[in-house]
Amino acid sequence: MSISRYSTDKPINKEWAKKSLNIYKGCKNNCRYCYAKRMGYRFGWKKEGTWTEMEVQSNIVKKGFRKLKNKDYKFDYMFPSSHDIFPEIVDTYIDVLRKVLSAKNTVLITSKPYLSCIEKIIESIESYKDQINFRFTITTMDNDKKNYWEANAPSISERLEALKLAHDKGFETSISIEPYLDKNPIRLIMKVEPHVSETIWIGKMSNIPNDSETYYEFQEQINSLDNVKVIMANVEELPEEVKAKIMLKGSIRDMLRNEIYKKYKN
Ligand code: SF4
């Protein structure tokens, strides 16, 4: 298996875009595995226990944007990266997005999408289509797991609808299966692939929270090197046109590289 075929050499904390852009602190989705929430509490930019209270960053909402200097990344901005887009904030989101796009920046729109929000965004910025990629997070085919880890986020079927819509409207589309919540994400890959024009990223859950009674052990197990090897063997069996879209997040890439390094060192 060639890991480089499925990887980039970008640093693990900055794989997708030159810069992250956020206009709120906090996120109503309140996913149990949320990395931004942990960082917010740790570094004090969000008061412990207030993650679901979304505080607008007025200075960012009001500011102007120029074209970012960027030679290394396909996308100038990933927007948002530490909150999501909700019906009650979508108009503010679109106002800022328009400013970023009109300065000729490229934008990776990342979301666990509400269909109504994606409809509105598409309607408002269709003329900037070539500067946008919609990257939607779909982590599982199992509603019980979704309801446990991402209780407040839109259903899997709603996210699939949003993906189909963006793809049918001719936008570049991609999927993030990070963190994968199923033992084997191949069924999910095959489900989304027809509606993905660009990439499908697979990543592990980092720092599994130990409050996750029901799924803690399961998540540890599916994160293991043995399971990652099984997933990769399954990926290798996929049709070429599907394989061409698969990308590994740094969490998996580095795990597999370490394994190869150890093998040749001994
Ligand atoms: S959608 Fe993203 S930012 Fe919002 S709680 Fe979930 S993981 Fe955190």
Image (spheres, grey):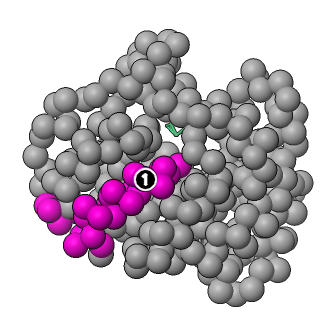
Please provide percent x and percent y for residue 179: 67, 47
Above-or-below relation of 89 to 7: above
Q: Is residue 62 in view?
A: yes
On whether ligand 1 comes within 8 Å of the CB at mark 1, the answer is no
Q: Report the residue that reaches farthest toward the bottom.
A: 240
Q: Is residue 251 in view?
A: no
Please provide percent x and percent y for residue 193: 64, 74
Residue drawn at x 77%, y 60% as measured from the top left? 185
Please provide percent x and percent y for residue 4: 63, 72
Does residue 16 appear to the left or right of 57 in the view shown?
Answer: right
Residue drawn at x 84%, y 47% as measured from the top left? 222
Q: Quadrant of residue 154?
A: top right
Residue 106 in magenta?
yes
Secondary structure state at the residue bearing disc 1: helix
Above-or-below relation of 143 to 40: below
Residue drawn at x 48%, y 55% as measured from the top left? 115
Q: Residues within 10 Å of mark 1 (few under 14, many from 20)?
A: some
Span highlighted in magenta in the image: 102-129
Q: Nearer the viewer, residue 14 or 246?
A: 246
- Image quarter in which the C terminus is found: bottom right
Above-or-below relation of 147 to 12: above
Residue drawn at x 64%, y 37% as measured from the top left? 150
Q: Which residue is mark 1?
A: 116
Does residue 155 appear to the left or right of 58 in the view shown?
Answer: right
Q: Report the residue that reaches farthest toward the front.
A: 116
